[in-house]
Amino acid sequence: MVGIKNVLIHVNPNKKLVSDAWGDESETLLKVQIDNSLEMNWKPEDIMLILNFDYEYRGIKSVVVGDNNYYKFSAGTPSKINAIVELFERGLIEDNLYWFHDFDAFQLEELNIDLDRSKIALTNYGVTNMDGDYGRRWSTGTIFFRNGSEDVFKWIQEAVYKYQANEEVALLALTRHNKNKILDRIDKLNITYNFATRRRNVGEQLKITDLPIKVIHFHPFDKRPVFYTKQKYNNIEVCVLGKNPTGKPLVTERLIKIFKQHGIINFDS
């Protein structure tokens, strides 16, 4: 069986761990990700930190990519796709399974993915409360891929610039028309690999999830209500305090402990 690499990407023109939406909270989330991964027995050499500047945390040093990976559209930036394409072009994607995930997509359980080397694997949005085409979108908050999928990422990259949109809009356009027979190159995963809460119906999400949740996707600094019930519960309340249909936290005690260590929460759950 091939090994698995844990991929985190952040490209910023200021060469800092900041984001337009969350400011310097990105560095806290990165440290949480690395701490959580190490506690789950990931080897340091299997954690790939992809930045456009030098950085080191707990012995894990960044792989530096070009600043040209950052490009700003009104709907966001395709930096994750651009950076992955650069990794392919530099020969840094080997015969392993790679798991890219956003800084706010946290691993809770062991990952069990068997993927053909020519494919990528990801989830859809699940049960949303959002208007428009979100219910038909693929969610790129977590993507599994191997070294035979370079052309798939280049198709997405090409569509990103064609439509001047983020990679989810681009991928929706490609799959809607099955351009290049792209649907033959995508495995749809159960929502357990990307269980998002923002503007989701959490109760209905749980019904379609292969439990226990393997990857939970929520921004702990986001104070906006989740919108799965009439109550105005935010992400921490839903995921950590158990204000959800299960009546229990959706995250592990391990992750709660790490949140406390980094000052994300300062109360007993």
Image (cartoon, grey):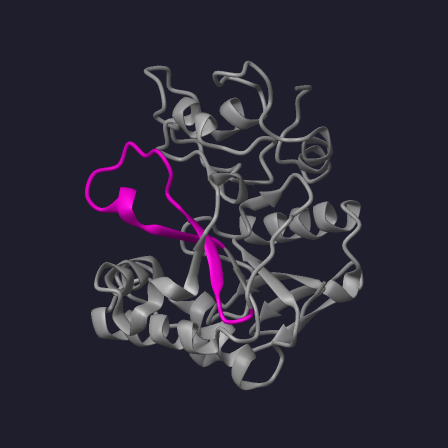
Give percent across and percent down for residue 116. 55, 65
Q: Quadrant of residue 266?
A: top right
Q: Residue at x 57, y 85 (%)?
A: 90
Give percent across and percent down for residue 63. 65, 74
Q: Quadrant of the N terminus?
A: bottom right
Give percent across and percent down for residue 160. 30, 70
Q: Quadrant of residue 36?
A: top right
Left or right: 185 as drawn, with respect to 136: right
Q: Quadrant of the C terminus?
A: top right
Left or right: 230 as drawn, with respect to 35: left
- The correct choice, above or below, for 109 with respect to 86 in the image is above
Q: Is residue 77 visible?
A: no
Q: Residue at x 62, y 53 (%)?
A: 30
Left or right: 150 as drawn, with respect to 160: right
Q: Residue at x 53, y 44 (%)?
A: 193
Give the total number of marks visible in the rendering: 0
Q: Nearer the viewer, residue 210 or 172?
A: 210
Q: Nearer the viewer, residue 199 or 31?
A: 199
Give percent across and percent down for residue 254. 73, 34
User: Residue 140 in magenta?
Assistant: yes
Part of the protein shown in magenta = 117-142
Q: Nearer the viewer, residue 132 or 188?
A: 188
- The correct choice, above or below, for 197 with respect to 185 in the image is above
Q: Quadrant of residue 109?
A: top right
